[in-house]
Image (cartoon, grey):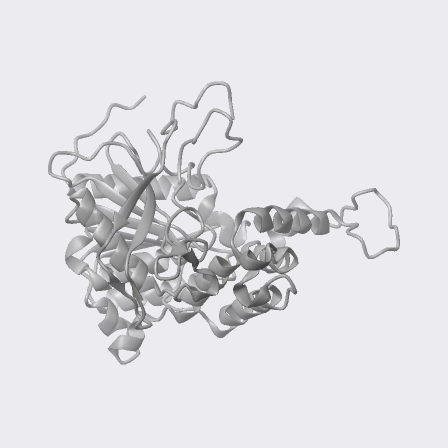
């Protein structure tokens, strides 16, 4: 954390918790009798509530999208490069809401929460949630905040899937949809990656069928393996070659099975860090939500018919070296929107960073994003701000 908060930061922020007593019937048929959603807001909501932006997070994300929780923070929120004064999502004009989804492990009700029916931690008894369940709970939060229509709903990867679901499920409540590095449904290969990751966790002796809390354990090894596998899929070959090459940690071969290459050390570090902050049952739930997402299924597997429900304008963005959510998948969305006679802008950004590119401050990406959000502001009749 710098000694002085950057001028383009939203500054120090504090999470809020909204409790809901109204039961939520999930796609699975199970019911959450009550639940909490943890969220953060940046900027000010205007008088007619027309400047609100919803940020939907990806698999391992949470509500802390921008700013700092304290002066001791080593880094800001996960999308700080895009949210703040003068940034694409300019908090001098927009009121930004970012939340932790149901089933998460950052404060919203999930597997680590207490089950009111038993008085004990939910653990693996927490119901599997679908993207439509998240969107329904987000809509309820919008009701509490007095937001009848979002100026834009924005998200990357799994967050982009939530954006699509919003445009279908609540078409009157979305003015613009920004879908970044996403897909209309997962490919068989992606489902396979998720299953390998889940199996790594499930086969860990410390997993105990999801009841590791009762045993006082954490499936650390399984979580590390799952994260290492996931991280491999988020990076491109070019990015890994550029960042690590075949560099050796000690400059020589040791002829052992311990990590010797820099890339091995990096993956171990990422896995270790992830295993200390993320809940294993949450990881299982989030990957299942990814697998299940297929909104066209309800429309005779016709994506055009599915997206015909939408009434908003769209921005769809992909990245050249993203092989997990390849540009071809974004083009499926774009082509379906075009055939459904919807207003859609599309860009494929050249980047060597793979899927992670959507999180990074790539100049062409930020310029495009900034230009589209300017269009959002204009369509909502938001006043201009002075350029610094």
Question: Which sits in the foreground, 26 or 23?
Answer: 23
- Decide if residue 214 is on the left or right side of residue 54: right
Task: Identify the residue at image location x=40%, y=32%.
Answer: 67
Task: Identify the residue at image location x=39%, y=61%.
Answer: 118
Q: Quadrant of residue 119?
A: bottom left
Task: Identify the residue at image location x=49%, y=70%.
Answer: 191
Q: Quadrant of residue 372?
A: top left
Q: Is residue 59 above or below residue 367?
A: below
**Residue 295 seen:** yes
Q: Residue furthest top?
A: 3
In percent of width and height, residue 200 lies at 61, 65
Question: Which sits in the foreground, 239 or 198?
Answer: 198
In percent of width and height, residue 261 lies at 76, 50
Q: Quadrant of residue 88?
A: top left
In percent of width and height, residue 175 lies at 19, 51
- Decide if residue 23 is on the left or right side of residue 131: left
Q: Where's the C terminus, which quadrant?
A: top left
In percent of width and height, residue 245 lies at 71, 49
């Amino acid at each position: 954390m710098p000694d002085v908060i950057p001028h383009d930061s939203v500054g120090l922020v504090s999470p809020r918790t909204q409790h809901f007593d109204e039961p939520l019937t999930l796609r699975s048929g199970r019911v959450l009798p009550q639940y909490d959603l943890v969220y953060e807001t940046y900027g000010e909501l205007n008088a007619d509530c027309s400047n609100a932006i919803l940020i939907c997070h990806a698999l391992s994300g949470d509500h802390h999208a921008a700013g700092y929780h304290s002066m001791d923070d080593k880094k800001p929120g996960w999308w700080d490069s895009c949210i703040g004064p003068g940034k694409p999502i300019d908090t001098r004009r927009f009121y930004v809401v970012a939340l932790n989804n149901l089933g998460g492990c950052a404060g919203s009700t999930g597997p680590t929460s207490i089950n009111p029916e038993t008085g004990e931690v939910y653990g693996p008894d927490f119901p599997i949630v679908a993207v439509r369940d998240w969107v329904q709970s987000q809509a309820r939060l919008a009701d509490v905040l007095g937001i009848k229509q979002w100026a834009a709903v924005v998200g990357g990867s799994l967050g982009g899937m939530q954006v699509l679901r919003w445009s279908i499920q609540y078409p009157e409540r979305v003015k613009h949809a920004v879908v970044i590095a996403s897909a209309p449904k997962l490919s068989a290969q992606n489902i396979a990656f998720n299953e390998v990751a889940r199996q790594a966790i499930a086969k860990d002796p410390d997993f105990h069928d999801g009841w590791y809390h009762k045993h006082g354990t954490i499936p650390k090894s399984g979580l590390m393996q799952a994260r290492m596998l996931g991280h491999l899929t988020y990076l491109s070959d070019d990015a890994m070659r550029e960042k690590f090459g075949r560099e050796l940690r000690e400059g020589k071969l040791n002829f052992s099975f311990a990590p010797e290459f820099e890339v091995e050390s990096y993956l171990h570090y990422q896995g270790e860090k992830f295993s200390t902050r993320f809940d294993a049952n949450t990881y299982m739930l989030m990957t299942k939500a990814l697998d299940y997402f297929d909104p066209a299924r309800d429309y005779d597997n016709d994506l055009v018919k599915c997206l015909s429900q939408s009434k908003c304008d769209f921005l769809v963005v992909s990245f050249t070296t993203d092989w997990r959510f390849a540009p071809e998948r974004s083009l499926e969305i774009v082509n379906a929107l075009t055939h459904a006679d919807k207003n859609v802008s599309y860009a494929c950004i050249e980047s060597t960073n793979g899927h992670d590119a959507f999180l990074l401050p790539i100049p062409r990406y930020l310029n495009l994003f900034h230009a589209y959000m300017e269009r959002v502001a204009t369509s909502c009749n938001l006043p201009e701000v002075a350029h610094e």
